[in-house]
């Protein structure tokens, strides 16, 4: 059974009451020009053909839809499939968007690329495509995240990127975005900002979603080939929300497919000790977009916490806020302890180390699978691999 949701965003970049363009005046014209350029590119068969060729021959798409049979058996028999984005070049889904955006940057004549990163995977993906296309690359990263993701910092630098530590505030992802936006305001004539998640001002949430839709498009085709029907449940972790919207979007009109996004519950839903925006968050504006975010009664953005650097952010992408508001997607959370337990569970049961971000989705699978009928089909997005997290996870698990 299918439904027909409204096409979002609208011409002004709004997803219902969410989204929009809340940026300094100096960025309004560049963003409007970018939206026009992207619309032309998405309708150009040559642009899509070049992207598809690189996704296949350089990045490694399509990724497998893997039946986790031992995990399925251990959790009670509901069929659990993993969409293996961890097997992509650079180790996570982030390369889909980075590649699409650098092709767009090349098309509009930009020669310098900037980016922000939290867990480091988007930074690595951006450094990778910059090396591939011979462009200057500057990546802003919170000093705290640089320490806990030292391996990815080294990978970026080996590929020629300049990694700039950000020490202000909490020194994590929000501060890295602030610094990247400051750079862009001052250098927009020759610089393109490859924003790493489905966040920020229009047209970024739409562009990032579109470049990641390949995840759900492939998963839909693969599950029909394997099972002859659509899944009952899709699960993905949600920081900004890029991997989740990529998986969910091609299924949104299939009313019988339930979707659950899993946020970072940190140490529990206590102010400043988590990053679950739908758990006690409020409507506000942060870094270019109107969405759900974590703020105190005075409107000041709260500190956040997660064992996973990539989910440690105070706002959620505007399309997720919209989907939650209309009841199409459910949002829950997993705590640090639950994510770490799932990290170890998948490792010992299937021989797969998930990224700590992805482990939040796996934690929900561990919780929900035993309650589902045995004939149910579940797809969880394994958005990245856990090599980058081994040192940190080992502190808790070994």
Image: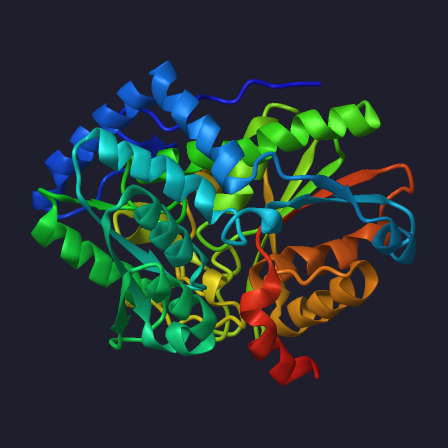
63 on left or right of 351: left
Q: Position of residue 7 (x, y in %)?
A: 43, 22
Q: Is residue 314 above or below residue 88?
A: below
Residue at left offset 39%, top offset 25%: 50
Q: Position of residue 173 (x, y in %)?
A: 36, 64
Instruction: Specify the quadrant that holds the C terminus.
Output: bottom right
Q: Position of residue 293 (x, y in %)?
A: 39, 57
Q: How was this image coloured?
A: rainbow
Residue 37 location in percent, x, y? 23, 25
Q: Is residue 325 left or right of residue 359?
A: left
Q: Identify the residue at horizontal 69%, vertical 69% (top origin).
A: 338
Residue 299 seen in the figure? no
Q: Nearer the viewer, residue 151 or 180?
A: 151
Picture quarter with the N terminus: top right
Residue at screen point 14% across, 37% down = 30
Quarter occupied by residue 282: bottom left
Q: Quadrant of residue 8?
A: top left
Q: Is residue 55 visible?
A: yes
- The answer to whether 134 is drawn above or below residue 255 in the figure is below
Q: How many marks?
A: 0
Q: Looking at the image, which is closer to me, 254 or 397?
A: 397
Q: Residue at x 54, y 54 (%)?
A: 91
| Nearer to the camera, 63 or 287 | 63
């Amino acid at each position: 059974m299918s439904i027909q949701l409204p096409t979002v965003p609208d011409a002004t970049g709004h997803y219902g009451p969410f989204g929009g363009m809340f940026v300094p005046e100096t960025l309004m014209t560049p963003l409007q020009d970018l939206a026009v350029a992207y619309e032309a590119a998405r309708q150009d068969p040559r642009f899509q053909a070049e992207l598809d060729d690189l996704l296949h021959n350089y990045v490694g798409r399509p990724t497998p839809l893997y039946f986790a049979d031992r995990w399925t058996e251990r959790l009670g028999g509901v069929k659990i499939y993993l969409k293996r984005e961890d097997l992509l070049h650079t180790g996570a889904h982030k390369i889909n968007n980075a590649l699409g955006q650098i092709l767009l940057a090349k098309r509009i004549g930009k020669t310098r690329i900037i980016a922000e990163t939290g867990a480091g995977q988007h930074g690595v993906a951006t450094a990778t495509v910059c090396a591939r296309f011979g462009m200057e690359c500057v990546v802003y990263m919170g000093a705290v995240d640089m320490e806990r993701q030292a391996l990815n910092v080294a990978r970026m630098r080996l590929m020629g990127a300049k990694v700039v530590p950000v020490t202000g505030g909490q020194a994590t992802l929000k501060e890295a975005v602030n610094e990247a936006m400051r750079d862009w305001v001052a250098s927009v004539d020759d610089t393109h900002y490859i924003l790493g998640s489905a966040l920020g001002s229009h047209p970024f949430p739409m562009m990032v979603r579109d470049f990641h839709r390949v995840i759900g498009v492939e998963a839909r085709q693969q599950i029909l080939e394997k099972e002859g029907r659509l899944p009952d449940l899709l699960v993905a972790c949600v920081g900004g929300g890029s991997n989740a919207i990529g998986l969910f979007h091609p299924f949104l009109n299939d009313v019988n497919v339930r979707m659950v996004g899993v946020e970072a519950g940190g140490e529990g839903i206590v102010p400043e000790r988590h990053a679950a925006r739908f758990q006690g968050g409020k409507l506000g504006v942060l870094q270019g977009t109107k969405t759900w975010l974590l703020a105190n009664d005075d409107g000041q953005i709260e500190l956040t916490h997660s064992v996973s650097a990539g989910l440690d952010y105070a706002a959620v992408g505007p399309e997720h806020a919209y989907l939650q508001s209309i009841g199409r997607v459910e949002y829950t959370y997993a705590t640090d302890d639950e994510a770490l337990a799932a990290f170890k569970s998948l490792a010992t049961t299937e021989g797969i180390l998930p990224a700590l971000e992805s482990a939040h989705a796996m934690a929900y699978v561990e919780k929900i699978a035993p309650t589902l009928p045995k004939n149910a089909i579940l797809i969880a997005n394994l958005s990245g691999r856990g090599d980058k997290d081994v040192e940190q996870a080992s502190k808790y698990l070994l």
